[in-house]
Image (spheres, coloured by chain):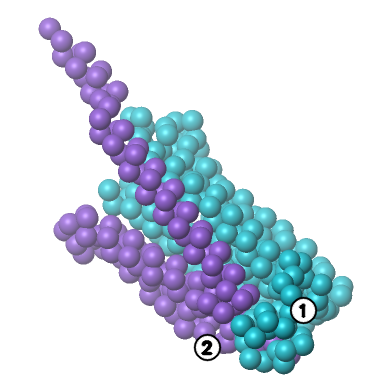
Amino acid sequence: MSDHAKGGHGSLKSYVVGFVLSVILTVIPFWVVMGEPFDSKGLAVAVIFILGGTQMMVHIHYFLHVTIKAEEGWQAMSIGLTILLLVIIMSGSIWVMFNLQENMMPAHEQIERVRNLP
Amino acid sequence: MADTSVKDPVEFFVTEDPHHHDGGDHEEHHHETGTMLGFWIYLMSDCLIFGILFATYAVLGQNYAAGPAPSDLFELDMILVSTFMLLFSSITYGFAVLRMDRNDLKGTLVWLMVTGGFGLAFLYLEYAEFSHLIHLGATPQASAFLSSFFFLVGTHGMHVLGGSIWLVVLLIQLSQRGLTHENKRRVMCLSLFWHFLDLIWIGVFSLVYLTGVLL
């Protein structure tokens, strides 16, 4: 029991490092929105998503303790497959639905058009 | 890895801890291979559910149907507080696992109760937010944005509620049976679940709250 209980559960140091990193990576995106330091909204959104992605990696490494070797590689392989599926589902639906929305006239524009008819 | 596969035939079910016979100290994290891996795969399928809900929100999140927009509704200070509630509960769960590794039952119980406290605080904040929104008339029926919002955030909240109930059951099991092998396995499963919910919450506050208020 005691010999294998150490490795996969992390140490106090790894939890504290993960926590401190998470706090930093949480506070910065909230500051980006609440403090409004950037003029460009695109830049702010990019910062939010990059820091969010980084914080997810921090959680996976420091809290969930996913490693290449854990469970003979099955853990890493299943998370890899999940991420692949997520990328396909999310980018695919956003891409398709964005094009759909672009090419269809929104309802309120149609209403405006009818209203402005002579 | 290569040398063990030469010695042993491939087994598709776990009869015992397969690492007991080859020394057991050359690699980390090989306890309860079957249950932990199975629970991990459950989490990955749960992750797909949330991925679909995130995609739905990303597609529908701008359709306000002349109703309220995120910047009219969300109070980021409260979201920051609930984010920290989950973050604190994550690290206190980590402390509980560390106490469990030392075979300290009392320490484990105390840290698990602290974790449950933070979890309940998060749930209360979410309940307060939802009832405030519904009071304002921003119900799930109001627009596609609100439907997808309530579905995504509500599903996460239901998971936290489920995790909290599991935590209470685990506290009872621990106080009755102590730190047995099975209970340690249960603590590790809930640990994965709890940290996973915090991970999902990162996506929620980034996509729904921060980006929503910004745009």
Taking depth in this image into account, of B43 and B107 the one nearest to the observer is B43
Seen in the image, is B124 located left or right of residue A111?
right
Tag count: 2
The quarter of the picture where the N terminus of chain B appears is: bottom right
Q: Position of residue A3 (x, y in %)?
A: 71, 91
Task: Write down the quadrant of residue A6 in the picture.
Answer: bottom right
Q: Position of residue B88 (x, y in %)?
A: 54, 72
Helix, strand or loop at mark 1: loop
Label 2 neighbourhood size at 10 Å, few (<14), some (14-19), many (20+)?
Answer: few
Seen in the image, is B41 located left or right of residue B175?
left
Task: Write down the quadrant of residue B10 in the picture.
Answer: bottom right
Label 2 sits on residue: A13
Task: Write down the quadrant of residue B15 in the picture.
Answer: bottom right
**Type of amino acid at the residue the image marks with label 2:** Lys
Name the residue rendered at 49%, 76% in the picture: A61
Helix, strand or loop at mark 2: helix
In the current view of this chain or complex, which residue is farthest to the left? A118
Name the residue rendered at 53%, 81% in the picture: A15
Name the residue rendered at 29%, 52% in the picture: B214
Chain painted in cyan in the figure: B
Taking depth in this image into account, of A14 and B44 the one nearest to the observer is B44
Label 1 sits on residue: B17
**Is residue B90 in view?**
no
In the current view of this chain or complex, which residue is farthest to the front? B6
Name the residue rendered at 72%, 58% in the picture: B165
**Type of amino acid at the residue the image marks with label 1:** Asp
Circle nearer the viewer, 1 or 2: 1
Chain painted in purple in the figure: A
Taking depth in this image into account, of B180 and A93 the one nearest to the observer is A93
In the current view of this chain or complex, which residue is farthest to the right? B176
Q: Position of residue A4 (x, y in %)?
A: 69, 87
